[in-house]
Structures are given as structure tokens and as C-alpha cells.
Amino acid sequence: MWLEILLTSVLGFVIYWFVSRDKEETLPLEDGWWGPGSRPTGREDESIRPFKVETSDEEINDLHQRIDKARLTPPLEDSRFHYGFNSNYLKQIVSYWRNEFDWKKQVEILNRYPHFKTKIEGLDIHFIHVKPPQLPSGRTPKPLLMVHGWPGSFYEFYKIIPFLTDPKSHGLGDEHVFEVICPCIPGYGFSEASSKKGFNTVATARIFYKLMLRLGFQEFYVQGGDWGALICTNIAQLVPSHVKGLHLNMAFVLRSFYTLTLPLGRHFAGLFGYTHKDVELMYPFKEKIFYSLMRESGYMHIQATKPDTVGCALNDSPVGLAAYILEKFSTWTKSEFRDLEDGGLERKFSLDDLLTNIMLYWTTGSITSSQRFYKENLGQGYMAHKHERMKVYVPTGFAAFPCELLHAPENWVKFKYPKLISYSYMPRGGHFAAFEEPQLLAQDIRKFVGLLERQ
């Protein structure tokens, strides 16, 4: 019997090895129409139009009236953030939002970078495009597409952009100077939401590729975390010859032999290629992976099944919206923050920055459409998508932030991205890397591009 088990195991491994061998596939570059009604017969308007973020007294007054009518439930004694967002601390945030937060001032900050819109596949796509204020003689900037996730926004990149576009003025060398393009995912912020079912990360990737072509870039770098990581991966799978390099701070690498080794990895770390740092970040398995994912993934199940139901409540209540989103900026930044009365929010972020991100969802009424992205990508099961089974054959860099929701060891990442040329254990930081640790992330992007260009 033991011989049969051994032979079966060996045969299974051989079959798996053959099935998993490198196959340089690409996703088909199809087309789509996501606007309302039928696709027009005429040529799509490809103009790029300047855009400006605006507000009004009416918008602010409506917000204040809704805040004034908020009904909060007192928290349990000593519950901290274990039951979700602590309403005692929420009162403090709401008071600041109502009485001190200056949305008009934040709109001015948003408009510091140039904003644009352009129509692609029937949707008005919003993006900021930031060019270097100065360049060394004879140099051209490197185009870099940066893509956000949920519940973030293009605003997450406002603090990292100066390190990329004007590095010398911020204590970094000028050997790598970028021009940065940050679009809103359709259905988020100022990018129009799809009117049709089925709008997923691959459709988003195709639209962003078309955006880069429209801006005149035949080759470019891409960077992302959260949904942005998957969208950028899809761009590399669609048009690898156009992607000079892919940099990620999160990886979707669940379909891998290595994930099956998790229960045994602590005891056989060397056998499975895990470093001491990997073991530190992943074990004990029950607490750091199993319980952690169970505790933090309830929102995902809701949004992947019935996004419109919870969306009704969140789109109607600014205080509810703030609690729902800001809870993620607490526990996804550092899981231990759930043990604090204030969720540790102001240890890493300012209330002005956090509320600006909330306002981008509130003023555009985009929370429901942003949540539908989970339904479109996960509603049929992530493993059902072809791109999940495909490897990525462009040079890749990866920044492993220690407080990310799920640590991805180097061998996991390299299985999906065989041309991984840079893998960094970051000294600190969590899920919202560009927002929380902009200089660290910028340095790792620069490190990756330097390694790539020296090859």
C-alpha cells in the first residue's frame, strides 16, 4: 500500500510539473463596450480633456446635514476594534469631519496635479498625469502607470509622486526620473462606472493599456497593489511586449504548489524554500493566516455576492461609509491595531488624508460601483479566470511589506512571475503601501528599475 501511495504521489508531482511548466501564453486582446445602451456606429471620441475637481456649498451642506442626523450604537465595554469600528472613536472623527475638515482646501490639494478625462470603450476614464518639474540634460522620463485598489483611490499616490517625478529634490538620486499616470478604476471616483455586467480586471487592464497608447507610450512600467496588482498583472499578460517592467506590492498567487505547503512550512521551512523572515511573517499558521483571513474577509464575501444591498446603506450615510472604509485603514495597516481604542489610524495617516479618500467615494456616489468589482471578479470564483492560471513573462519586482494581509514568499511570487528580478523584505508597512510608506515604496521601485536596466 505504501508503495502505491508513493508511486501515486510521484506520478501526481510529475503530472503537476508538466502541467505547470512555463508556457508563454498571452491573454487575447479583445474589445468591449461598457457604456449605456448599444455601441454607437461612429468612431469613439479619443480626445483627452482637462478636468478639475470641484465642490459647492450645497454639496458640503448636504454632507453636514447627514452627519448631524447620524445614529451611532454605543460600543461594548473594552471592545476596542474587535467588533469593527469603535463608535466612541468614530464620534471624534465625525466631529472633526463636521467642524474642522476643510473640503474646499482638500479640493485645492487634489488639483495640484493635472487631471484629465478621456472616453475609452464607452466610459469616461479619469486620470492624473504628472511630469517631472525638471530633467537632467538629454534625459527623458520613464512612463509609470500606477493603479490603486479598494477602498483606496488615486489620492493614495499623492505623496509618492514627488519621490518619483522629482527625486533629487527629495533626497534621492536622479538616475531614475518618472512621469506618473494614475487612473481611477472605472466605477471608482471620477471614472465612469460600467453600465453592463462582466466588467473585470482584464477589461480594466485593456482600457488602461489603451490609455497609455493614447498618451503616446508604446512601452511603460506598471505598478500596483490590491486590485491594482491584479490589473497590472493582466496588462503584462495582455501585452507583454509593451510592459518594460512590472512592480507589485501584493501578489495573487493562490494557484501554486507552494500554497499547499503552508501547514507544514514551519517545520520544513528549508525543504520548501522558506526563509526565517517568511516563517516569522506566516506562523503560527492558525493566527497569522487562517484566523486573520477569516477575520478580515467578511466584506469580500458580501461584495462578491450582493454588493448593491450594502451599497444602498453606504451611499446614503456618510458616517456609515467612513466607518466601513476606515476600518480597513486600521486593521489592514497593522492587524494589532484592532487592540487599540482608536484603531491606530492616526499613527500612520492624518485625518485630512483619510477623509479626503472618503470624500472621493462620497461626492462621486461610487461606493456601490466600486464594490461591484468584487462581484465581477470573484462572483464566479477567482480560480475560474484564465489569467489566474497563466504565468507572467515580463521582468518583475516585488516589495513584501510585513503587515500585508497575506505574506507572499519569494518562491510563491517566482512561481507566478518567473522573471522576478527583485524581491525585497520591506522594513515596515502594510496594505496601503504608497499611502503609508511612500518613500520606501519609491525606493524599491527605483531599485527594481535600476536592476532591470543594468541587465
Image: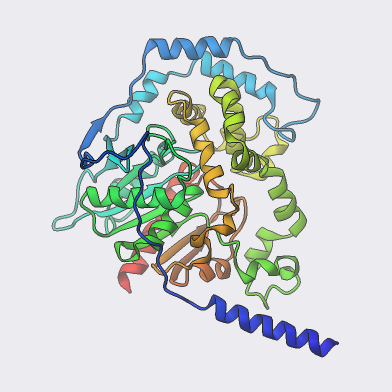
Identify which residue, 44 or 342, lies in the foreground. 44
> Does the image show residue 93?
no
Q: Which residue lies furthest to the right in this view?
A: 1
Q: Which residue sits at x=31%, y=66%?
A: 241
Scheme of image coloration: rainbow
Q: Which residue sits at x=43%, y=26%?
A: 364
> Does the image show residue 366?
yes
Identify which residue, 338 or 236, lies in the foreground. 236
In the depicted structure, whether residue 405 falls above or below residue 285: above
Instruction: Please tell me in which quadrant of the rendered image residue 282 appears.
Output: bottom right
Residue 233 pos. (x, y %): 44, 58
User: Along the horizontal axis of the image, is 325 left or right of 419?
Assistant: right
The C terminus: image quadrant: bottom left
Q: Residue furthest bottom?
A: 3
In the depicted structure, whether residue 400 falls above or below residue 367: below
Instruction: Please tell me in which quadrant of the rendered image residue 176 appears.
Output: bottom left
Identify which residue, 408 or 383, lies in the foreground. 383
Residue 124 pos. (x, y %): 32, 36
The N terminus: image quadrant: bottom right
User: Along the horizontal axis of the image, is 427 left or right of 133?
Assistant: right
User: Along the horizontal axis of the image, is 193 left or right of 78?
Assistant: left
Q: How many marks on residues? A: 0
In the depicted structure, whether residue 252 falls above or below residue 358: below
Q: Which residue sits at x=40%, y=42%?
A: 157
Residue 193 pos. (x, y %): 42, 35
Residue 64 pos. (x, y %): 51, 12
